[in-house]
Image: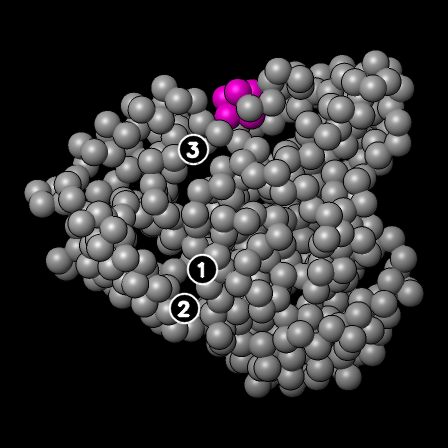
């Protein structure tokens, strides 16, 4: 017994000293001798959480909880691991159990608040985080989580106070700068927001370009976020090319292969467009696409909005027109409106549970007469409509290779109805009419309360009146669509 205790103490010492491999090996040897040793199970899970493997952490700590269910710390760490693994629904009852065993567990209080925040239960999240903040004043992670909840409740002054308190102690803390920047951007304070937003990315070896005359330099523009972000901010690339050309410089745009064909067709006459590789191409200075608004000093009143700035190949448009016509069912040839439909984003997105819509909630839209829907949904969610009785919505995404094909499909639609995902940006960049269904707490770029977007004139925004209330949002959209379809039918006659 003493030998096993000595081994556990040695493992813990390695763990506390930051020797992750040595600690993992020591825990493994202990568990080979005693597979139910609760401390080794628990701390193995904690170690995996600390090294970024949340799923493995959940498995190990769950075993510890089963062996020793009355110990509060494993319950708290299990809840935190479930939260880190993007499973807040499972985390919430686990953390409730942890706090019943130890009401003063600050980590569990914080994790409970963060879990409820992810579930859009903002008042409950704030209460738990305020308890955590009272228990340990000045704790940076607690203040950051509390500030984020306050920001999403539109208590912006209180939120800034939390972020400022974190930054007073840790001036270079990137997540606090970003959280504060998002609060400023969503309120339309773009100039202040862009500055804080610079903390989102790692620096290149080459100097950044911030709008200064580049001389004869080669400027590399590159993606640093998702597809929608690249589509939104590539509008600045021709402006950079004009500045560079005036001084004898040039611009390279490095992008994802799925955007290459579209960007190359629209920008390739003045900019060298490359598909992203392992190493950046030779260049002198660089700028992430999402840093271009800062470089140009963009405010709400001077957003470059010369739409369309992206367009598909006419040959692709004709081919996709024929394919879409082939999807029409009997009696649909004379339907007034062809409407694309996207109801879910990337399931790996941290806010996907709030921004994506259950397929069954779409029924009010799908019942509108005079409309021919086509699904432009990708991924596992695409099968959602097939499970709805009496609903026939053909899949338009078969044989789509990239965003150039998707653009050609959009060019054949009267309207796109979508959640907040990349295709909304593509429709906006093309000037295609698009209705965007937004959660109660929107992404910063859609601002607050308005039904239009200064980034995309062809977008109309439909917002949840309260967290989770897609029924009201979709009911409103269905009523507007019904009126629009009726007008189109009358015009066609």
What's the residue at 42%, 73% (across, down)?
A: 469
Density class for disc 1 (Cα within 10 Å; few <14, some 14-19, many ≥20) is: many
Helix, strand or loop: magenta stretch: helix
What's the residue at 48%, 29% (across, down)?
A: 311
Kindly identify which residue carries mark 1: 437
Q: CA distance from mark 2 to mark 3?
A: 26 Å
Coloring scheme used: one colour
Magenta extent: 261-265
Q: Which mark is residue 407?
A: 3
What's the residue at 27%, 48% (across, down)?
A: 337
Work out whether residue 125 or residue 331 is closer to the camera in this orientation and state it: 331
Residue 416, image x and y in percent?
A: 38, 48
Q: Is residue 326 left or right of residue 80?
A: left
Q: Is residue 241 left or right of residue 358?
A: right
Secondary element type, mark 1: strand
Q: Which mark is residue 474?
A: none
Quadrant that contains the N terminus: bottom right
Kindly identify which residue carries mark 2: 473
Q: Is residue 115 above or below residue 123?
A: above
Residue 205, image x and y in percent?
A: 83, 27
Q: Are marks 1 and 2 in contact (CB under 8 Å)?
A: yes
Is residue 226 visible in the rendered image? The answer is: no
Q: Quadrant of residue 377?
A: top left
Q: Are marks 2 and 3 in contact (CB under 8 Å)?
A: no
What's the residue at 54%, 80% (across, down)?
A: 96
Q: CA distance from mark 1 to mark 3?
A: 20 Å
Q: Is residue 262 magenta?
A: yes
């Amino acid at each position: 017994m003493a030998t096993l205790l000595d081994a556990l103490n040695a493992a813990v010492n390695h763990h506390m000293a930051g020797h992750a491999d040595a600690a993992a090996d020591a825990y493994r040897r202990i568990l080979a001798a005693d597979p139910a040793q609760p401390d080794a199970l628990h701390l193995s899970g904690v170690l995996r959480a600390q090294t970024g493997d949340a799923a493995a952490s959940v498995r190990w700590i769950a075993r510890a909880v089963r062996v020793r269910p009355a110990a509060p710390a494993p319950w708290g760490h299990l809840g935190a691991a479930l939260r880190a693994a993007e499973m807040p629904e499972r985390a919430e009852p686990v953390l409730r159990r942890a706090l019943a065993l130890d009401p003063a567990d600050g980590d569990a209080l914080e994790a409970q608040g963060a879990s409820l925040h992810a579930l859009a239960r903002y008042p409950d999240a704030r209460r738990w985080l305020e308890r955590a903040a009272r228990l340990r004043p000045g704790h940076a992670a607690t203040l950051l989580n509390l500030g984020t909840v306050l920001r999403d409740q539109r208590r912006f002054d209180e939120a800034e106070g939390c972020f400022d308190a974190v930054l007073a102690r840790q001036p270079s803390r990137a997540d606090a700068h970003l959280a504060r920047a998002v609060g400023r951007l969503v309120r339309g304070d773009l100039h202040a927001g862009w500055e804080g937003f610079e903390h989102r990315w790692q620096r290149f070896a080459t100097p950044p370009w911030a709008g200064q005359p580049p001389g004869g330099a080669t400027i590399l523009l590159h993606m640093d976020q998702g597809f929608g972000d690249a589509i939104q901010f590539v509008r600045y690339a021709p402006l950079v090319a004009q500045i560079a050309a005036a001084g004898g410089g040039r611009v390279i745009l490095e992008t994802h292969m799925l955007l290459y064909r579209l960007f190359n067709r629209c920008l390739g006459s003045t900019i060298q467009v490359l598909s992203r590789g392992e190493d950046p191409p030779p260049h002198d200075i660089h700028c992430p696409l999402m840093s271009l608004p800062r470089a140009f000093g963009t405010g709400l009143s001077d957003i470059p909005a010369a739409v369309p700035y992206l367009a598909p190949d006419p040959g692709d448009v004709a081919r996709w027109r024929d394919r879409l016509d082939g999807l029409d069912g009997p009696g649909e040839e004379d339907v007034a409106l062809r409407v694309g439909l996207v109801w879910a984003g990337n399931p790996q997105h941290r806010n996907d549970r709030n921004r994506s819509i259950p397929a069954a909630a779409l029924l009010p839209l799908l019942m509108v007469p005079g409309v021919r829907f086509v699904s432009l949904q990708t991924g596992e969610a695409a099968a959602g409509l097939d499970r709805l009785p009496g609903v026939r919505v053909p899949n338009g995404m078969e044989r789509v290779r990239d965003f150039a094909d998707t653009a050609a499909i959009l060019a054949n639609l009267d309207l796109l109805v979508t959640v907040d995902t990349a295709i909304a940006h593509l429709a906006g960049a093309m000037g295609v009419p698009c209705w965007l269904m937004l959660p109660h707490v929107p992404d910063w770029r859609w601002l607050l309360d308005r039904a239009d977007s200064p980034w995309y004139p062809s977008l109309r925004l439909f917002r949840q009146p309260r967290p989770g209330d897609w029924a009201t949002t979709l009911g409103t959209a269905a009523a507007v669509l019904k009126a629009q379809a009726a007008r189109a039918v009358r015009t066609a006659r």
